[in-house]
Amino acid sequence: MSSKISRRRFLAGSAAGAALVMHPGKKAFASGSFSGFPDGMGVLVDLTRCVGCRTCEAACNKEQKLPEPALPFDDYSVFDEIHHGNQKRRTTDKAYTIVNRYEPEGSDQPLYRKIQCNHCNEPACLTSCFVGAYTKTPEGAVIYDQHVCVGCRNCMIACPFHIPAYTYHSVLNPVIKKCIFCYDTRLKEGRPPACVESCPQQVMTFGKRKDLMKIARERIRKNPKKYIDHVYGEHEVGGTGWFYISSAPFAEAGFDEDLPKEPIINNVKDFLAMVPVVLVVWPALFTGFHLLATKGKSHGHGDDHSNDKQEGH
Amino acid sequence: MVNAGKQLITGLGILLLFSVLSVSCYAMDYPDEVEIDSLTNLYEAVVFDHAMHVDATENCSECHHHTTGTGVTNEYCAKCHEGDVEMDVVACQDCHSDDPVSPDNLHTAKPDFFYHDDKPKLKAAYHLKCLGCHSEVDGPTGCEDCHAKTEAGDKFYHSGEFAPKEDAQHGAEHE
C-alpha cells in the first residue's frame, strides 16, 4: 500500500516538476529574440565623416566629470600610441569613449573610429552579471548600479566589444566604469549624449534606432561607391543601439567581424535551461527508481522488526 | 528709318535680355563676409570670406544646393530641383536647424523615410561642406586654422594654460 502511494506521488511529482521547469524554459528562449525596445534610442555612426578631432572625448570627459586626461584633447599624438605590443587605445575608467586612427589598405585617407559602449539590445554584460547591477532601459541605454557592483569583472569578459573598464587603482571598492549613453543627465530627458552633440561633423546621428536604421540604409543606397554595404550592429550580437557605416571593410577599422548574429547569451541558453531540469527532475526520478527497486525488499532491522510485530499479533 | 527703328528695338531687346540674365545670375545681394558665431562658447566667431569663395567656386549650388537658382550640381537633388528658381531662403541656418533633436520633437510621428530627412544640423552642415571641399582642394583643415579657441575652449580641451601638468601626467600614466 505504502509503496503504491509513493509511486503515484513520484509520477505526479515528476510530471509537475517537469511542467514547472519547462515553462520558464520556454520563456527564456523567447527572450533570446528580443530585438530592443520599440522606441529605444540609438546612434548611427558614419565613419566616413570622422576627422579625428577628439572633441567627443573632451565632451565626454566634461559631461561625466572624469579626471584630467594625461594629454590635452587636441593632442593628436595619442593616435600613435600602442599598448601591450599591438593594441590601440581602449576605453578606461577615466575615458568612456576613445577615437583611434586606422590606415585602410589602398586608401590615402586615414579612417577614424570612435569606440564607446554600443548599448546592445540584449547585452552580454547584463546577462553575465550575477548581482543584476546592469539594466537595459526602455530609452535604449545600458546602465549599471555602482553600489550593487561587487567588482567581479564578469562583464569585462562577456562584452564582445571590450568596453567595461575597471577602477584598478581603487583598493577598497573597485567597480566597473563605462559609457551610460549620458542616461542620467541627458537621455532620460530625450536629449542626445554629450559626444553626439559636440561632434562638428555629425559623425553621430541620434534618434530612434528604427528610424536611424532606415537613414543608414538610405545613405548606403544613395552612395553605393562610397559605403560598404553593411551596417555593423544591425544584427551583430542580436543588434546594438549604436551602429556603424563605413567606407572601408570593418575589419580594417578594428571591428570584430566574426561576432555571432545572435545575442551572446544564446551560446549558453541551451545549457542553462537544462540546469533546473537536471536539478529538479533527476533527484525525483532517481528517488522513484530507488523506491521501486527496493519495493517489498527487507530494509534491515526496522522492517524485520515490524514484520515480527505483525506475526506476533 | 525703318531699319534704324528695327536696330533700336533689337538693341533694346538684347539689352533687356542681358539685364534679365545678369539679374538671374547675380540677383541676390550676397554679403562679402559672413560672421559665423554659432560656436562662440568654445571658439571666437569665424569671419567667413564669402566674396573669395564666390570667386573660387564655379557654381553657387556647390554650397547652396538648389536655393540660389543657379542650377543644381548634385544629380540626386536635381531629380526634383532641376531648373529651380532662387528661393527666399539661401543662408545655411535657414534650413539647417541648430538643434534638430529636442525632447519636444523627438516623439512626434514621422513618415517613413522621406527626402531631407537626413539633413545635417547647422554645425555639421558648415563643417561637412567646408572640410569636405578643403580636403579636396588642399585648403586649411586644422581646427584652429579657422577657429581661434577661447579660454572656455582651452578649458574644454584641457589645452593651453589648462594643459595637464607634467607631474599629473606621470601620475595618470602610472595609475
Image: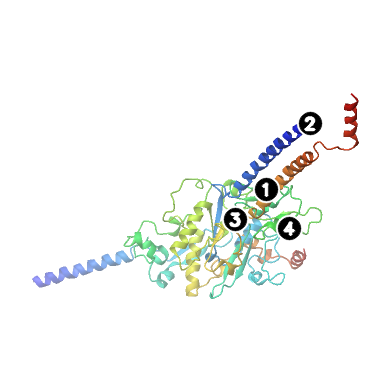
Q: Chain of mark 4?
A: A
Q: Are marks 4 and 3 on the same chain?
A: yes
Q: Which residue is mark 4?
A: A166
Q: Which residue is mark 2?
A: A2
Q: Is residue A9 left or right of residue B59?
A: right
Q: Which residue is mark 1?
A: A273
Q: CA distance from mark 2 to mark 4?
A: 60 Å
Q: Which residue is mark 3?
A: A262
Residue density around tag 1, few if under 14, some if 14–19, many if 20 or more, within 10 Å: some
Task: Name the residue located 38 percent from the left edge and 65 percent from the top edge.
Answer: B75
- Badge nearest the viewer, 2 or 1: 2
Q: Is residue A297 above or below residue B155?
A: above
Q: Earlier in the sequence, mark 4 or mark 1?
A: 4
Q: Are marks 2 and 1 in contact (CB under 8 Å)?
A: no
The answer to whether residue A49 is seen in the rendering is yes
Q: Chain of mark 2?
A: A
Corner quadrant of residue B8: bottom left
The furthest residue to the left? B1
Q: Earlier in the sequence, mark 2 or mark 4?
A: 2
Q: Is residue A91 left or right of residue B45?
A: right
